[in-house]
Amino acid sequence: MESLHKIDAMCNSALKQAPHISIVTPVYGASDILDELHQRLFNSLSEITDSFEIIMVNDASPDNAWEIIRNLAAKDSHIKGINLSRNFGQHHAICAGLDFAKGDWVVVMDCDLQDQPEELHKLYNKANEGYDVVVGLRQQRQDTYFKKLSSRFFYRVLAYFTNSKVDHRIGNFGIYSQKVIQSIVSLKEQNRSFGLFAIWVGFHRIEIPVEHAKRPYGKSSYNFKRMLSLAFSSIIAHSNKLLVIFVNLGFLIAGLSFTVVIWLVFRYIMWGISVIGWTSLIASIYLTTGLTISVIGMVGIYVGKIFDEVKRRPLYIIDSTTFEMSPDND
């Protein structure tokens, strides 16, 4: 009888132990992919360790993704499903998954199978060489020409304004040690950008080539407009360079205007030429007025972002899960 109690205690202890690897993947518009994603993840992770969890975060997907996640979780205890109350966005969904990821190593990846589960062993093996962050570098992106071109433009603009080195071939796919994840989780800004956060927190990082696949079903929800919006939001959240540019532009215009005034006064004194040019005067007024309004608008955007931050609203709201949440996760 006593031996049976010991076995039960050992089993309960093993169940409570943190997994070795946690997978975090946000889900949106991918119901046709989830079964294959689960199977390929299970096969790849089983070759590395038996101790793993797969956290699928349903970001209010318009299809039946949550129903599929619940069915997968019922069949496989490695699956943990989180259902958000509404669509909060990809990076907020990632944040929700990270809050529940307890693995020694945490893998963040998209659910569309362009990040191939078979590449996990490359990331894991490299991490075991002493790296805290190993990010996949997509050598040959299997996207449309327009998607690759817009992505290149997006990351170049982002890198310029945020003063960070951001390669357009890098997505969310990577493996991170638990201390890196805890550092990222501690950042509570409303405006989320997982990739920029991973760069900002530092630690020992390396980028390695991985194979990128074509999306087997559907199409990406990130069109040019959404990428432009994401870039602008990231710039506002991570840099004040736009304000500096407008300040410098203001000083430049003021300097040019002062030079023109000196020249006009000098011309009038030396040669008696009066100031003429009603059209140029009106054009100058409209130019300076437009710039002034632009600067005020830019300052207003930054103030608006500050307003969003001071409200201290939660980053996401959970509707339901496929597992029992512990008190420290409430």
Image (cartoon, grey):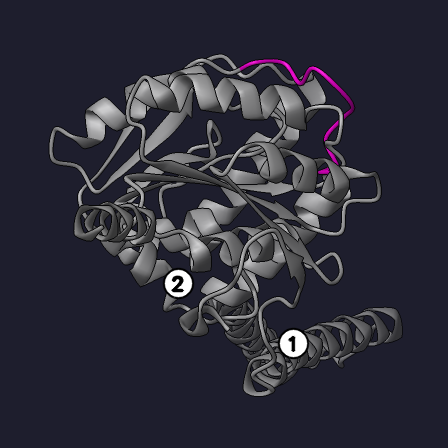
SS class, disc 2:
helix
Q: Residue 255: x, y in percent?
A: 52, 75
Is 212 a magenta residue? no
Q: Are marks 1 and 2 in contact (CB under 8 Å)?
A: no
Residue at figure coordinates x 58%, y 69% from the top left: 315
- Residue beneath disc 1: 295
Q: Residue furthest left?
A: 130
Q: Name the residue under label 2.
A: 185
- Specify whether 252 is left or right of 307: left
Q: Where is residue 195 in the image (x, y as percent from the top left)?
A: 44, 46
Residue at the spot 39% in from the left edge and 63% down from the top edge: 185
Secondary structure beneath dot 1 equals helix
Magenta highlight on residue 218: yes
**In terms of depth relative to the viewer, which is nearer, 52 or 110?**
52
Q: What residue type is labelled 2?
A: Val
- Asked if 276 appears above or below 55 in the picture, the reply is below
